Image (tube, rainbow, N blue to C red):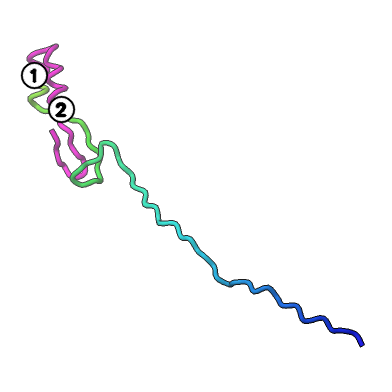
Amino acid sequence: GYAVPPPTSQPNYSSTYTIIQQPATTTSVVVVGGCPACRVGVLEDTFTCLGVLCAIVFFPIGILFCLALRQRRCPNCGAAFG
């Protein structure tokens, strides 16, 4: 007779998987000049009545007063910031 070779064993592979999940990234958009009150509108520069009056009465130096006395106003909620 002849010798029968021993049966070869299959390598034992593990069936576990490792899944690495990245944390969700949150994107925030910052609007420059956005309204801090409602966070929707964009602030617009407006001149106060006193600033316009100073610009007319004390021309040409009054223009500096007019620029210094500007007010920023939100067209959405109407809030005014000095």
At which x and y percent is residue 4? 84, 84
Q: Residue at x 40, y 56 (%)?
A: 24
Q: From the viewer's perspective, tell me whether residue 45 is left or right of residue 21.
A: left
In three-dimensional space, the C-alpha distance between marks 1 and 2, rounded to whole angstroms, equals 12 Å
Q: Is residue 17 magenta?
A: no
Q: Residue at x 8, y 21 (%)?
A: 53
Q: Quadrant of residue 11?
A: bottom right
Query: Could you classify mark 2 by the number of other residues whose Cα lies within 10 Å: few (under 14), some (14-19), or many (20 or more)?
Result: some
Total marks placed? 2
* Magenta segment boundaries in residue numbering: 53-82
Q: Residue furthest bottom?
A: 1
Q: From the viewer's perspective, tell me whether residue 10 is left or right of residue 2.
A: left
Q: Is residue 55 magenta?
A: yes
- Which is nearer the N-term, disc 1 or disc 2? 1
Residue 31 against residue 10 in the figure, above or below: above
Label 2 sits on residue: 70
* Callout 1 amino acid: Cys
Label 1 sits on residue: 54
Q: Residue at x 8, y 13 (%)?
A: 58
Disc 1 or disc 2, which is closer to the eye?
2
Residue 16 against residue 40 in the figure, above or below: below
User: What is the quadrant of the N terminus in the image?
Assistant: bottom right
At which x and y percent is residue 51? 10, 23
Q: Residue at x 36, y 52 (%)?
A: 26
* Callout 2 amino acid: Arg
